[in-house]
Image (cartoon, rainbow, N blue to C red):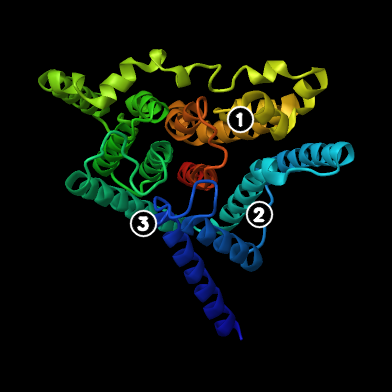
Amino acid sequence: MKNLSFKEDNLSNTILKLILYFAIALYPIYIFPSGTVQISHFLLLIFSILTLIHIGISLNKYFFIFLFLLSYIFLVEAFYISYDIYEFGYSNFKYSKQVLFLTYNFILTVSLMSFFNDKKKINIILYGLATAILIILFSIFYKFFFSTNLYRFQGYFNNPNQLGYFSVCCFSLIYLFYRNLYIPYYLMISSIVIVVLFSILSLSKAAFISLFLCMLFAIKPYNYKYSKIIVAILLLSIILFMTFFYQQILETNFFNRLVNTFNENDSSLKMRGYFVYFEANYMETIFGMGPKKLYELQGYEVHSTFMMILSCYGFIGFLIFSLLMLFWALDIKKSYGFSGVICVCAPSILYGLTHNGIRFSMFWIIFATSIFLSKELIKQKNFKDK
């Protein structure tokens, strides 16, 4: 009976690993319209359900804070739905998609934190991510030879900003794999160059600006004796490259989009929806105005993760979400230092200043993966000290 149970456990883990691998690998392939379930999302949902049934729930501070945030958001949504039904006799549930996305990502995050009980399981994320990057590279070559419209590259995503955000998430995962010795330094650098190239081709300002800033911290080897020399060589190589190809860089769409950032209408804080919060009344500033009123005032969603939370769910929702992010950053700092916070947490947070990234499941995959890897690194350090 024990051998049979052991075989069943191995089979279950193998099935879960395969589902998770294909979910990560196929993440860049969007077949259906944005805002709907893609192949990867469906596989992640199957993975989450099977994981919670087979393994259970890992109870930790992140689970309780995230659950508290989700419960509060449900209360706010329920209040406004009940108010509409009482006032008008009906409620439009299309404004509740935000809470549906967050519920889905909560289930995904909890299942991943439960699944990661063995360091070897992280290899599945690594292999899946490598496959996803190869799929995007293939799409680049395909578009280059068979397409005439190359202004903003989007790969197999529905829009370029999705590719930009995926590049940001890849950057953080690649750095994590390096710091936990899954990949060597040279592979980390070459992989980062590739995902930065993705962000440049997407022409997503939020993506390539955040990656440029964070890359300065990522290129420094953390455990090499001659790390300063390596950094100097890399920086010199970048300077020489920019010097030799200065004229060509000036003529690129990437450079034109970068220098015209402040001249574009959609780049202002007003267009991003930062000011809609200040149109709320006293109670709404504390508890939130809800997605429906936000859409009525703004006409579209707030293009900022934190400001979306603040506007829809008020100061209380903003405080709970900020607490979740704060604990995450503190744990990353404890394991990887200040450079770890910059390379793991900062890219997504910086991107979220001008885009609502809370729905993007890859962000929550980073979140869960980094929490597990940071704990494993602390265990290794404690073991070496002993």
Q: Assign a secondary structure to mark 3.
A: helix
Crowdedness of circle 1 by 10 Å Cα count: few (<14), some, many (20+)? few
Q: Say which amino acid is labelled 2.
A: Ser
Query: Residue 58, which numbered label?
Result: 2
Rendering coords of residue 161 (x, y %): 42, 36
Q: Earlier in the sequence, mark 3 or mark 1?
A: 3
Rendering coords of residue 237 (x, y %): 16, 25
Q: Assign a secondary structure to mark 1.
A: helix
Report which quarter residue 224 is drawn in.
top left
On screen, residue 43 versus residue 235, left or right, reads right
Q: Say which amino acid is labelled 1.
A: Leu
Q: Residue at x 89, y 40 (%)?
A: 86
Q: CA distance from mark 2 to mark 1?
A: 20 Å
Q: Nearer the viewer, mark 2 or mark 3?
A: 3
Rendering coords of residue 384 (x, y %): 45, 44
Crowdedness of circle 3 by 10 Å Cα count: few (<14), some, many (20+)? some
Q: Earlier in the sequence, mark 2 or mark 3?
A: 2
**Location of mark 1 (residue):** 326
Task: Tell me: residue 330, above or below residue 50.
Answer: above
Task: Tell me: residue 47, above or below residue 336.
Answer: below
Depth check: 327 or 215 in front?
Answer: 215
Q: Assign a secondary structure to mark 2.
A: loop
On screen, residue 67 versus residue 332, left or right, reads right
Asked if the residue at tag 1 contacts the one at tag 3, i.e. Cβ–Cβ closer than 8 Å, the answer is no
**Count of numbered circles in the view:** 3
**Location of mark 3 (residue):** 127
Q: Residue at x 28, y 26 (%)?
A: 254
Q: Say which amino acid is labelled 3.
A: Tyr
Q: CA distance from mark 2 to mark 3?
A: 24 Å
Depth check: 366 or 315 in front?
Answer: 315
Evaluate whether residue 206 shows in this view: yes
